[in-house]
Amino acid sequence: MKKKRPNVLFLLTDDQRYGTIHALGNEEVITPNMDRLVERGTSFMNTYIPGGTTSAVCMPSRAMINSGKYIFYLDACGKDIPKEHVTMGQAFRAGGYHCFETGKWHNGTESFARSFDSGENIFFGGMWDHWNVPVSDFREDGVYDNLINFTPNFSANMEPVKVIADRIHAGKHSTNLFSDSAIKFIHDYSGDAPFFMYVSFLAPHDPRTMPEEYRNMYDPAAITLPPNFQEMPSFDYGWNANGRDETTEAYPRKPEKIRRHIADYYAMISHIDAQIGKILDALEQKGLLEDTIIVFTGDNGLAVGQHGLMGKQNLYEHSIKLPLVMCGPGIPAGQRINGYVYLLDIYPTLCELCDIPIPGSVDGKSFAGMFQNPAYVTREDLYLVFQARIRGVISHGFKLLEYRSEQLKLTQLFDLNQDPWEKNNLAGTAGTAPLVEKLRGRMAEYREEWQEESNEFGRLYWQQYRQYEAAEVHGVPGPKGVNMKNQINDWMSKKVTAPQL
């Protein structure tokens, strides 16, 4: 008799950076249930997203997770997932799995409809008031055209917007809302087929509100400021003054204010942790825990005062490096792996672990071989992208970042082994020139491998890059360059679909 394949529980948080799990080194955050996953499974210590092509970094990130595609192949920065890109849910449905979703889905209603055959309390959007989330019921026909009026800021604007929703759960926190739906699914599940359950939280994304019992767990005065805390950013790369995230705290960033932000950030994570514990308990009570592969990760990180920034519109570690813990059948307990992986690699890895064919549209690389051989190399290095402003590479512990905006040409080189907080820029120091040139060469190779210049953001970045190069060759001041902000805004406002490769 063929052995029954494992169930899959995919737990995805919003804006939870690496370094926010107690068992993995953060002494101040309280996460007993995430610690439980660490103890039961394998933790990947160098998990990244490539970055983002829009300020809402979570949208392309989630599109990459669910399509397995590289960032320049997304449709309108991940607003939708094209039909030719087989989603993770689609692959599992085709493989005989019952696929359930609750929580945030940021990549269009059509891709949701083809990914799941059941669901509850589905949120089609990016961020919202945690206590009043507009959600939809699962629809068999896949048509989510149920629009309601909502006025986001009635004191400033009386014009309502249309949101997809059947109802608003007034007064119930999003973390409880989605975890309760997950627990109900587990208790009600009686099918013979294995299940794929995708539980997608809105927290710890701001607004940072949570039940008082969790806020009271943290005293801001006792919070340690990160070593790379700055009251002001060191330079303006053309985004930090315009992104919404950067307005969540005034300049200069005052230490007492940042401690309060971090305390609230941790409180939201502890609230999620408690609800994850209830989901794990439900699996155990139903006798399903040992037969379920559990994936825990976040969609992107967040600065919260590091480098003088608040958001994730950058390529520093705090914004692109994520926690990733996996446990369950075939996954060693208590193991930590240092090899590089992208979040988009989770999709083909789960396919391999669950004996499901990896669709040909998937770009991600399975890292299943790392479970039994931690020295197995899935990726030698990683390519990094932010909009049309920054490119970078991480390789063997070194990280190169190249900023090219209308006003700025800057190179940063960090030794992440010696300087994990990215405080010391080594670019321009004695002996580093060969390494910088080598990593620049790898950047150019990635540009060609990912066919980057077929994408609007890639074309704009490399146009600016070459203009600066030409200026240096001719010994003249750097060009004013293209107005990337206007071009990108025009492109997005016209809702032009990104070129498909």
Image (cartoon, rainbow, N blue to C red):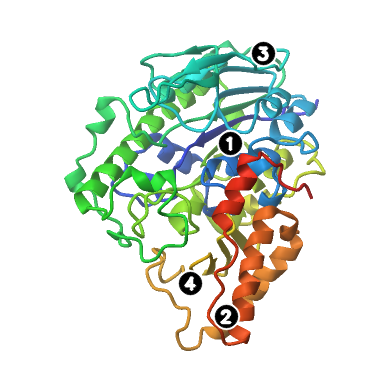
Compared to residue 473, the image places residue 326 above or below, namely above
Q: Quadrant of residue 340?
A: bottom right
Q: Disc 1 marks which amino acid?
A: Gly
Mark closer to the observer (2, 1): 2
Q: Is residue 109 left or right of residue 430?
A: right
Whole-angstrom CA distance, mark 1 to mark 4, is 40 Å
**Label 1 belongs to which residue?**
328
Whole-angstrom CA distance, mark 2 to mark 3, is 54 Å
- Could you say whether the residue bearing mark 1 is in a helix, strand or loop? loop
Q: Earlier in the sequence, mark 2 or mark 4?
A: 4
Q: Decide: marks 2, 3 in contact (CB < 8 A)?
A: no
Q: Residue furthest left?
A: 221
Q: Decide: marks 4, 3 in contact (CB < 8 A)?
A: no
Compared to residue 148, the image places residue 486 above or below, namely below
**Label 4 belongs to which residue?**
412
Q: x, y percentage for residue 157?
A: 40, 26
Q: Which mark is residue 139?
A: 3
Whole-angstrom CA distance, mark 2 to mark 1, is 40 Å
Q: Earlier in the sequence, mark 2 or mark 3?
A: 3
Task: Name which residue lies at 78% across and 33% down.
Answer: 83
Q: Earlier in the sequence, mark 1 or mark 3?
A: 3
Of 487 and 14, the residue lying toward us: 487
Q: Earlier in the sequence, mark 2 or mark 1?
A: 1
Determine if residue 224 is in view.
Answer: yes
**Label 2 belongs to which residue?**
435
Task: Name which residue lies at 26% across and 53% down.
Answer: 253
